[in-house]
Amino acid sequence: MNKPRVYIDGQEGTTGLRIRELLAARDDLDVMLIPVEHRKDDEVRRQYLNDADLAILCLPDEAAAAAIGMVTPSAGTRIIDTSTVRRVSEDWVYGVPELSAQQRQAIRVADRVANCGCYPVGFLLAVRPLIEAGLLADDVALTINAVSGYSGGGRRMIEDYQSLPPGTEGDGARPLCLYGLDGAHKHMAEMCAFSGTSTPPLFVPSVDHTFCGMLTSTPIPATLWKGNVDADAIWDVLRDRYTEEPFVRVVAPGDNAEHLRDGRYLDLSECNFTNRLDLFVFGDPQVGFVLVGRQDNLGKGASGNAVQCLNLMIGAEETTGLTDGLDG
């Protein structure tokens, strides 16, 4: 039986490199790597795109659109696009298997899958089940505070952070900074489309001086919850929703302290180099609760999630080549 042929268009970029690493040991795939000298040759790329059974596009929006245009209908090439604009397109399936009971099967049979953005995952998977369960109104106005490692900004940001002079670690390193303060962050569209609330959230992203890792926190005041809701009630909904999911760990409120460094600090790096998403519930009924998602922005937020979708699309075990980082 022939192995599925997988081509990564953009194999030298941050997302593409991580996908290559995740696929490197796979013997169930034929990973098609274009020679470096031809990776910007459109005619050679066109051949690779049309010879592949499945192409993963790790390209900016316009370049991804151009690559999609190179694929002839008769080739039958299926596509996972990791760029932004097609995530809310009706012609593409949104690539988060855990989003709903139907999403995994939709990805399995799709010819066009739009891989998720990194920031939305921890927000969507925390909030959507609570709205569906009636704990939050379907027009609730939410705020998202998030911090990512600098790899989320792509090659330019990586070079910016890694080009700092020697000896600038610690206090001398580039500080945590906010961005996207005009409210026009590219992930807003999918947050609005798939969260379950009709009110656009107020999103405040930030970048830290660490290569990868991500925390997404959604503070929800007591006045926004419907009925008498405590942390265990929130946890019950999330636990029931994700109990069979291989890459989502819902931490019981009573276990929160075990995950806090020095009993106080929730580090953003504990899911790094895994495809795991941790979900936490902090707070109390009088003030409100903070929902927190923790992941690797290049893992469940990008490359790892793309490989998870790839596995579904080719009929492989969904967890093949991926780890939740909890074994052993």
Image: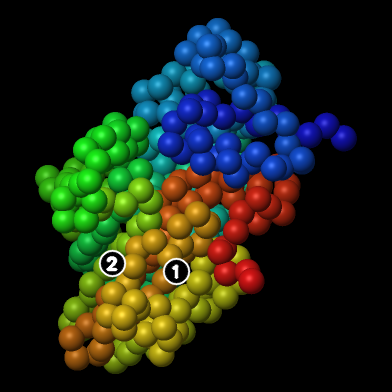
As displayed, is residue 248 above or below residue 39?
A: below
As displayed, is residue 122 above or below residue 62?
A: below
Q: Residues within 10 Å of mark 2 (few under 14, many from 20)?
A: many
Residue ID for mark 2: 217
Q: Quadrant of the N terminus?
A: top right
> Looking at the image, which residue is at 44% across and 31% down?
13
Q: Residue furthest right?
A: 1
- Element carrying mark 2: strand
Whether residue 168 is visible to the viewer of this picture, yes or no, is yes
As displayed, is residue 55 above or below residue 283?
A: above
Q: Position of residue 147 (x, y in %)?
A: 27, 57
Q: Position of residue 28 (x, y in %)?
A: 77, 41
Residue ID for mark 1: 278
Q: At label 2, which amino acid type do we have? A: Ser
Q: Residue furthest front?
A: 167
Q: Position of residue 204 (x, y in %)?
A: 19, 55
> Looking at the image, which residue is at 39% across and 47% down?
117
Quarter of the image where one finds residue 143: bottom left
Q: Position of residue 301 (x, y in %)?
A: 43, 51
- Judge left or right: residue 243 versus residue 123: right
- Judge left or right: residue 113 versus residue 14: right
Q: Residues within 10 Å of mark 1 (few under 14, many from 20)?
A: some
Q: At label 1, which amino acid type do we have? A: Asp
- Whichever of labels 2 and 1 marks the residue nearer the N terminus, that label is 2
Whether residue 100 is visible to the viewer of this picture, yes or no, is no
The answer to which of 228 and 326 lies nearer the viewer is 326
Alpha carbons under labels 2 and 1: distance apart: 12 Å
- Judge left or right: residue 162 versus residue 275: left
